[in-house]
Image (cartoon, rainbow, N blue to C red):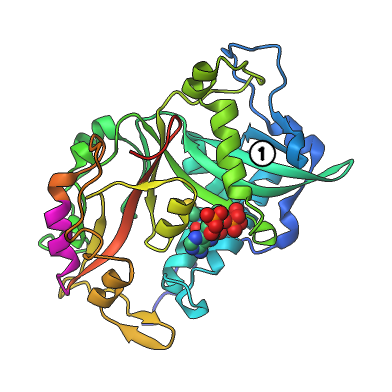
Amino acid sequence: MPSSPPTPRPAPPADQYINLRAEDRFVPTRALRAAYIRYEESRSPSAINYVPLPERGLELGIVDSGAPALARAISSTLCRSLERAKNERGGHLPTAVVERVQLEIISPRGVARLWGTHGHRFVLTREVDRETRELVATILVGRSKDTIFFFTGRYNNLRHSTIAEEVDFTQPAGRDPHQRWFDLFAFPDVERFKPRAYHHIANFVVAPEHRGQGLSRFLLDAIVRKYSRDHLEARGAPIEHSQHLLCGRGFWQIGDPPWLSRMQALGFYLRWGGESFFLERDWAPLPPIYEGARRITNLEYNRAFGLPQRYEGRAPPASGAAHLLDRVPEVIRLARDPRAKLQYFQTMFDFLGGAP
Ligand SMILES: CC(C)(COP(=O)(O)OP(=O)(O)OC[C@H]1O[C@@H](n2cnc3c(N)ncnc32)[C@H](O)[C@@H]1OP(=O)(O)O)[C@@H](O)C(=O)NCCC(=O)NCCS
């Protein structure tokens, strides 16, 4: 009997693609201005709904990431930046992982519909001509301090307060019920997974064309000065826009290992003991890791990012409130386990004052 032809896979939606089109970073000024959010309960309702930053000829605002021109511009900036993280280009991630993220999370569709619905999407733009602006940097900031944008590849937009109920920690990884998804990871206990008073951040990127001009620091500084409620109140500064304010104490990031040093250069600090690891199982080997052409072990990878040596014989930070100091011995143990590979660091950034 002839076998029936395989069912064709449905074509992905038109806005779900890997967006490497550099020209998409240019947006019509009208579309940008129309996409800026106005917060109905703003304490400054008659103010404009974005922030001109004449000192660098830039403009900052929170946009509706569902506006198609904005979703494309943001996606283009994020996808092109992440290209450089591919192992085959000297980056730290397997190509398949990068492409999954590019397609599912930071495609125009992902930008518009996934984490964007739970975050304030800040864009920093510069004028190109009277009708056009160029997106030079962006960051996504959790609207609620309770939001966690992602938790392993299977959960998005979780609420920290209900994580224990919402996540099925016994779910199988695949078909075999004995092989469990959460056996593949080691992370802090969920109660303390996120520091409560901080906003989760993600997608923090400066367009590849504009690196090396201090724009990332400028963006962070502008958000703090113009959007942090505590910072505005501490200075008695006026609220110059009719958008939301950030009511948390700062930012919290779950960051890929190579990001730690750059985030530290920008004023973020390591959350001690907040590391996550992949755990290799016989039934779930990890993709090989390369440093240049040479294949390296998990232990070498961990060491390359300062583990466990960054904790050995080091005095913990003086103000330990948000740190997970009691988990540090476990992190040291994991970093020395040949089957454990560092997945993420956690970093934090305070709106008021420097690092503790
Ligand atoms: C990280 C990023 C936002 C910085 O952009 P930028 O504004 O062009 O950075 P600058 O070149 O002006 O550097 C700002 C500071 O970060 C440091 N820095 C930048 N890239 C770095 C790197 N790869 N490693 C270590 N430090 C780095 C710089 O030395 C500088 O610090 P300094 O002033 O004390 O010397 C940008 O490189 C980027 O978009 N990277 C890809 C995405 C990413 O890694 N995002 C962060 C995690 S979400």
Observer able to see residue 224: yes
Q: Is residue 264 left or right of residue 29?
A: left
Residue in the foreground of this view, choosing between 320 and 286: 320
Name above or below for residue 255 compared with residue 57: below
- Residue at far right of view: 130
Q: In which quarter of the image is the C terminus?
A: top left
Q: Main secondary structure of the magenta part?
A: helix
| Residue 95: image location, x then y, percent | 46, 73
- Residue bounds of the magenta highlight: 328-338
Q: Name the residue under label 1.
A: 67
Name above or below for residue 47 compared with residue 96: above
Q: Is residue 183 left or right of residue 275?
A: left
Q: Which amino acid does label 1 sit on?
A: Ala
Question: Which type of secondary structure does the marked residue at label 1 adopt?
Answer: loop
Name above or below for residue 238 compared with residue 80: above
Asked if residue 258 lies in the magenta stretch, the reply is no
Residue in the foreground of this view, choosing between 107 and 205: 205
Bin the neighbour count of mark 1 within 10 Å (Cα to Cα): few under 14, some 14-19, many 20 and up.
some
| Residue 291: image location, x then y, percent | 39, 81
Determine the quadrant in which ligand 1 lies: bottom right
Asked if residue 332 lies in the magenta stretch, the reply is yes
